[in-house]
């Protein structure tokens, strides 16, 4: 039963070489979970899971999280012919953390590449555990108790600077959430909670708030904390949603790019 690992960069992303039978057996599930938390992103090159196999593999790692209407597989594409809500995914082209509107965000997402765009469509990741660790002691003290209001509608302005009132109200209906800037995990580790849903720092002047959020986004997405995955058909990538920001690089919605997603239920509330 083959299972080999190789760190792709010093601070984020590990490649796992294995076979379907080994992965589906769950024998290495604990090791995969530990690597996921420590490395943020795991890459299984050209493993070629079917949808049923991807669901089964996801279930070996924790509690499976179905989609909003009970679907097990979510089609990640900007093509509205394949996903009626694809326009909502335009926000995925900007750095974000999934589930900032929830008390307990998902633990992890798993993406399989089914078809790709000839140009663009890579996925960027950054490790916000590592980014926090490298802050100065003075910065850690300054940010320790700051709270940030997150809203889905804030991300709307990234891809539609002049939205219609109807579009804005539709996004506003999703709600907003006040979250810690620094997530203090049960493990004792800490990570930064950032991304395009972050609207303003509570109790801070709006200009200073904007400067701080942009400063930290630039800090966390530096090359030493980041990894860009250039997809091949059949690749599976898992990322730890508790300490990893991600975004897709731009691609033509009509290109046929299609990824299939499964998710692991969250196990820890923001704190």
Image (cartoon, helix red, strand yellow):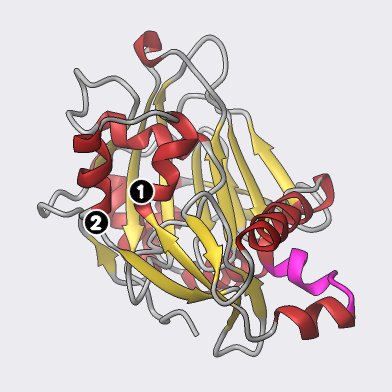
**The quadrant where residue 194 appears:** bottom right
Q: Is residue 42 left or right of 103 when viewed as pictured? A: right
CA–CA distance in space, label 1 to label 2: 8 Å
- At horizontal 84% and vertical 71% (from top left) the residue drawn is 135
Q: Nearer the viewer, residue 46 or 86?
A: 86
State whether residue 257 is above or below residue 187.
above
Establish if 31 lies above or below 217.
below
| Observer able to see residue 39 | no
- Residue 226 percent location from the top left of the image: 73, 48
Name the residue located 39 percent from the left edge and 39 percent from the top edge. 156
Q: Earlier in the sequence, mark 1 or mark 2?
A: 1
Q: Which residue is mark 2?
A: 174
| Residue 235 shows in this picture | yes
Residue 97 covered by magenta stretch: no
Instruction: Identify the residue under disc 1.
Output: 153
Q: Which residues are magenta?
A: 129-136
The quarter holding residue 137 reads: bottom right
């Amino acid at each position: 039963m083959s299972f080999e690992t190789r760190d792709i960069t010093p601070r984020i992303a590990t490649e796992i070489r294995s076979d379907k039978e080994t992965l589906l057996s769950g024998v290495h599930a604990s090791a995969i979970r530990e690597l996921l938390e420590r490395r943020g992103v795991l890459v299984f090159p050209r493993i070629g899971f079917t949808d049923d196999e991807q669901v089964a593999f996801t279930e070996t790692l924790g509690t499976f999280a179905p989609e909003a209407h009970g679907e097990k597989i979510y089609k990640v594409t900007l093509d509205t012919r394949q996903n009626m809500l694809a326009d909502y995914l335009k926000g995925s082209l900007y750095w974000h953390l999934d589930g900032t509107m929830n008390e307990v965000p998902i633990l992890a997402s798993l993406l399989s590449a089914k078809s790709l765009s000839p140009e663009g469509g890579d996925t960027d990741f950054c490790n916000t555990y590592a980014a926090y660790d490298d802050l100065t002691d003075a910065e850690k003290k300054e940010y320790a108790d700051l709270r940030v209001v997150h809203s889905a509608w804030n991300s709307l302005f990234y891809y539609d600077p002049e939205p219609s009132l109807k579009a804005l109200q539709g996004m506003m209906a999703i709600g907003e959430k006040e979250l810690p800037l620094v997530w203090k995990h049960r493990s004792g580790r800490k990570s930064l909670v950032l991304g395009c849903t972050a609207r303003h720092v509570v109790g801070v002047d709006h200009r200073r708030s904007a400067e701080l959020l942009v400063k930290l986004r630039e800090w966390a997405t530096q090359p030493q904390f980041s990894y860009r995955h250039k997809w091949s058909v059949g690749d599976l990538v898992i990322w730890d949603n508790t300490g990893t920001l991600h975004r897709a690089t731009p691609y033509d919605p009509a290109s046929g790019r299609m990824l299939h997603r499964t998710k692991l239920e969250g196990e820890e509330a923001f704190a």
